[in-house]
Amino acid sequence: MIHADFALRHAGQLATMLPNADEPLGRIRDGALAAREGRVVWIGEDRRLEGEVDLDGDLLDAAGACVIPGLVDAHTHPVFAGSREDEFAERVSGAAYPAQQSGERGIARTVRATRDADAATLLRLTEARANRFLVNGTTTIEAKTGYGLDLTHEAKSFDVLRQLAARLPLRIVPTFLGAHVVP
């Protein structure tokens, strides 16, 4: 008998990502899983759950939903202030990207807004982005700095990432990108 502190049952499809001859995604129809201390310890058909797992904890009914492993985004820049939505609209309309980088536009605009923002503002903005990752199924991100362009501002970005990693169920792998552009 496997001991678990969490179980999920009645998954219409449980994608294990363990391929076999019949199923390249390792899908189990009407699947279940059990975990202990945040680690999956058992997967199988729902009908086998009660006979193979000793559950002392929460039971979640997936109600026929498709259950997949968390997604990994290996290239993000979540710590920034400001918006370049207007530039995106211009690009969609055919404007050349280099033309958008002149003067106080493009990355230089984001650098200025990020450097001008206090730590609390950056934390609030980045937490909202981090929560959107989670809502959309992403459980791990590689998170670059790079909009600070000096040690003080880059350290502020790293501190934001550290705080979020401590309080959200999102795995954050920070990467120092000393300069997103040449200052």
Image (cartoon, helix red, strand yellow):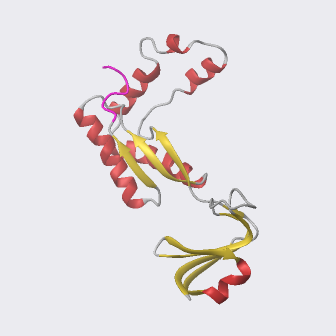
Q: Residue at x 48, y 71 (%)?
A: 38
Q: Quadrant of the N terminus?
A: bottom right
Q: Nearer the viewer, residue 62 or 28?
A: 28
On whether residue 97 falls in the magenta region, the answer is no
Q: Which residues are magenta?
A: 177-183
> Is 32 drawn above or below residue 181 in the view shown?
below
Q: Residue at x 33, y 41 (%)?
A: 157
Residue 31: percent from left, percent from top: 71, 72
Q: Main secondary structure of the magenta part?
A: loop
Q: Nearer the viewer, residue 76 or 105?
A: 76
Query: Residue 179's image quarter?
Result: top left
> Is 105 drawn above or below residue 148 in the view shown?
above
On whether residue 178 falls in the magenta region, the answer is yes
Query: Position of 18 compared to 154: left or right?
Result: right
Query: Residue 87's image quarter?
Result: top right
Residue 27: percent from left, percent from top: 71, 63
> Is 91 drawn above or below residue 155 in the view shown?
above
Q: Quadrant of the C terminus?
A: top left
Query: Residue 143's image quarter?
Result: top left
Residue 68: percent from left, percent from top: 64, 60
Q: Residue at x 48, y 43 (%)?
A: 74
> Is 99 drawn above or below residue 181 in the view shown?
above
Query: Position of 36 compared to 66: left or right?
Result: left
Residue 129: percent from left, percent from top: 50, 45
Query: Position of 65 compared to 143: left or right?
Result: right
